[in-house]
Image (cartoon, helix red, strand yellow):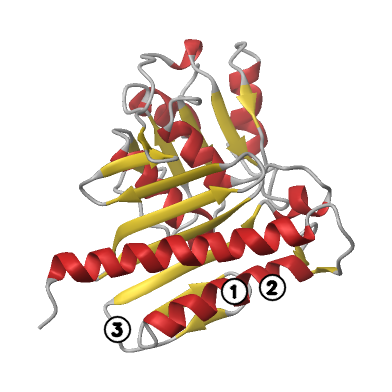
Amino acid sequence: MMNLSYFCTMLKQTLLKATEAGAQELRRFFNGSFVISNKEGVNNLVTEADHAAEKAIMDIIQADFPDHFILSEESGEIVQDSTYKWIIDPIDGTVNFANGIPICCVSIGVEQDGKMILGAVYNPFLDEFFFAQKGFGATLNDKQIGVSNKTNVAESCLVTGFPYTYLDTPNGPLTVFEKLIRKGVPVRRLGSAAIDLCWVAAGRFDGFYEHKLQAWDSAAGFLMVEEAGGKVTDFAGNHYSPYQPHLLATNGKIHNELLGIVNGNPF
């Protein structure tokens, strides 16, 4: 039987190779000429670069681990009878990418028996490579990172994302956003949930919330926050699962206060 530590090293090496391979495709297409199409919904873009990056990523994973389950944004599920699942977003921030805005990245998470064990997020345009391994912390370009020390929402710098649908639902994205900015809290919108989460992990933002995410948006990033000392839950305060839409990630110190605000508490 293969040594578990050795197998984890193999997983990590494949993850790093696959992430870099995807990033090479982003570099190749960025600010160039490529085909853009629209998936179901408003501004739900997919580009030629998404498909090229996804293929480059999947080729490496399947060469090393042909029996592993894969969930990818563009190809969907490649079902295998395996305890390991690779969750891939070949370009998180496709609208940014399509408009030449360098806030976009490759994001890949590795799940074992339903628990995230590895994550990599790489923005090749800022040369920022985030990596996390369960129980071993999170790094940015191989240097350890940690969440911020802010203790209240009023003094925090937050980040969010808006879905293109159901903006006007009761206590929805616009309501929460308005509540915060009317109190003078800076709330940014970068257009890449994976980067948002990594920047919480690095202490640049104190908290991130979003009302509608897919598993590939958050799989790697939420592990990054947890391994950097932060806290990630759904909007009910339960331990986060990437297979439900709501996400709240913070430095831990403002978590309960921001959770209350997101759920309709006065601020």
Residue count near mark 3 (Cα–Cα under 10 Å), binned few <14, some 14–19, many ≥20: few
In this view, 26 is above or below 54: above
Q: Nearer the viewer, residue 121 or 28?
A: 28
Q: Where does label 1 land, which residue?
A: 56
What residue is drawn where x is 31% and y is 59%? 116
In this view, 102 is above or below 213: above
Where is residue 184 shown, x and y percent of the image? 62, 11
Residue count near mark 2 (Cα–Cα under 10 Å), binned few <14, some 14–19, many ≥20: some
Residue 192 seen in this snapshot = yes
Nearer mark to the viewer, of 1 and 3: 1
For marks 2 and 1, give the CA distance.
6 Å
Q: What is the three-letter code of the residue carrying label 1?
A: Ala
Disc 3, SS: loop
Q: Where does label 3 land, which residue?
A: 82
Q: What is the three-letter code of the residue carrying label 3?
A: Ser
Where is residue 28 shown, x and y percent of the image? 75, 61
Tag count: 3
In this view, 101 is above or below 181: below
Q: Nearer the viewer, residue 158 or 141?
A: 141
What residue is drawn where x is 38% and y is 44%? 224
Disc 1, SS: helix
What residue is drawn where x is 12% and y is 73%? 3
Disc 2, SS: helix
Where is residue 89 shown, x and y percent of the image? 56, 63
Q: Nearer the viewer, residue 251 or 167?
A: 251
Q: Nearer the viewer, residue 89 or 262?
A: 89
Q: Where does label 2 land, which residue?
A: 52
- Between disc 1 and disc 3, whose residue precedes? 1
- Between disc 2 and disc 3, whose residue precedes? 2
